[in-house]
Amino acid sequence: MALDRSAPLAGGLGCMTGAAPQWHYSGRARPIASRCAGPEAQRARGSVPLPGGGIVAKPTIGRRWLPLNALRAFEGVAKHGSFTAAANALLISQSALSRHVIALETLLGAQLFERRPHSLTLTKAGQHLLPAVMKSFDRLEYALNDIRNETTPAVRTLRVQMPPSFASHLAVPILKEFPRASSEVEIDLVSPYGVGPPLSDVDVAVVYSKPMVTDLVTDLLWSVHLSILCHPELAARHAGKDPAAFIAANEIIHVRIADLPRHHLWSQFVRQAGLGALNIERGLVFDTALLAVQYALSGEGIVLVDTNLFSEDLRAGRLVQPFDIALDEGYGYYLIIHPEALSDAAVALFRSWLIERFGIPPSAAARAGSARALLSPERTPRARCGGGWDTGVHPQHCRPLRGVDGARPDPG
C-alpha cells in the first residue's frame, strides 16, 4: 500500500470526531476503525477545532507504536550525511530508506532534514531528535551485549578504532603487550582513512581532537606538536639556510584536513614563525600523515607532522628535524568511550591499560584537558636546534610556537 501523505501513520496521529477516536494506518499496517477524511487528516497536523464541535488532536506516541526502523534510518542518514551512504551502511535500498525517513517526518509533523541539491543538513527538529535517538540505541546495544557476555563465557573481541598513523607508529607496537594483561580479550583494530566520527560498531575509539565538552568519557593519550621533518640528505643539501629559505627551496608536502584549505597547517606554521610571505600553496596532498611521511622518506619534499608519531624514524636517522620550531594547535589523540561501556569489564581493562601504557598521569587523564601536556620526556624526542645534523640553523630561528587556534582534525 502506498504511503498516503494526507493521513497519519500507524502509532502517530489520530483524528477525533465527536467522542470516539478514528485511526487510519498506512503502509502494511492493517486499517482499524474508519478512515479519517482527507481534509480532517490534513488539519490534524495543526491540532485545530473542527466544524460541529469536533477536535483534532495529536496523541502521545506510545511505546507500542515507536517507529524503530524509521528511527534507525533517521540516525543513519544524520550520521552519514547522505541517503546513499546511509543506505549502504544499513544494507537497504535508498528508496526504502527514504520512505522510512518520510514516514517519520509525517508521524512527527515536522521536517527533519533540509534537503538541497548537493547537501543535507538537520533542521531544528532533527537536531533535537538525533541525540535522544543515538543515546537510546547506544544504551540498548550495551545492555544487550552485557547480557550476552554474561551468558557467553567466550573470548571477548574488542573493536578499537584508531587513525592510521597513530595505529601504525604507536598503537600496533605496544598492542602485542596487551594479551599479557588479559588473555580473555582480543583486539580487533580498525583504522579507517579520512576524517569522521567513530564508527558505530566499535567499542573504543581514539580520535584526533582538541579538548571536548561531551557526554563521552575522554582521556588524553598523546599531545600533538607539529614540526618540519625531511630526509637527512635533503637537509644536508640545504645546510646553512634559514627556515624561510629552506621552505622556499623545497617541495612542500601537505596532509589533508577536512573542510580546510590544503595549505592550512603550513600557513599557520609560517605565520606564527614570522617567516614572511612564502608560497606554501604548492606541493602534493596526502590523506594521512603516514602517507605524507612515506613520501618524504623517499628524499623529496618537507612535511609538517607530529614528531612524537615518527620518533622511531628520527632516532634511526631516517628522518631529521632541521629546525626546532613546533606548531602547537592544542590538538591531541583522545581515547573516547561511551559511559555505559565502562560497565563492560573488557572495555574498562583496555582503557586502564592504554592510559597506563601511554604514561599520562591519572589526574591529567581524568581531566582529559591539557591538550598541551607532553608525555614523559623520554617519549618526546625534540631535537635541539641544529643538534645532531649539519643544517647550519642559527639559534635565533629556534623559537616555539603556542596558541594557534582554528584547525580541524588531522586525518591521522
Image (cartoon, helix red, strand yellow):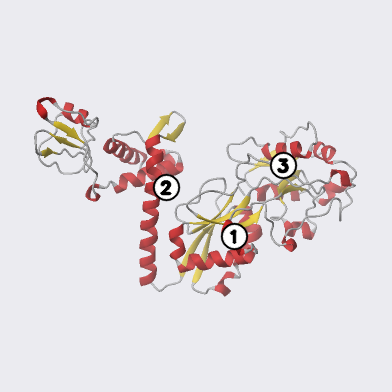
Rendering quarter of residue 23: top left
Which amino acid, by three-letter code, is at mark 3?
A: Ile
Q: Is residue 205 above or below residue 33?
A: below
Q: Secondary structure at mark 2?
A: helix
Residue beneath label 2, please? 89
Residue at image position (30%, 48%) is 68
Q: Is residue 361 left or right of residue 380?
A: left
Q: CA distance from mark 2 to mark 1?
A: 34 Å
Residue beneath label 3, please? 253
Residue 18 place in picture, x, y as percent: 9, 34
Residue at image position (36%, 52%) is 136
Viewport quadrant of the N terminus: top left
Between discs 3 and 2, the one toward the N terminus: 2
Query: Which numbered dot is residue 365?
Result: 1
Q: Secondary structure at mark 3?
A: strand
Rendering quarter of residue 146: bottom left
- Kindly check if marks 2 and 1 are in contact, taking CB atoms under 8 A apart as contact: no
Q: CA distance from mark 3 to mark 2?
A: 33 Å
Instruction: Kindly tell me whether residue 318 is visible in this rendering.
Output: yes
> Dot 1: within a 10 Å radius of its alpha carbon, few (fewer than 14), some, or many (20 or more) residues?
some
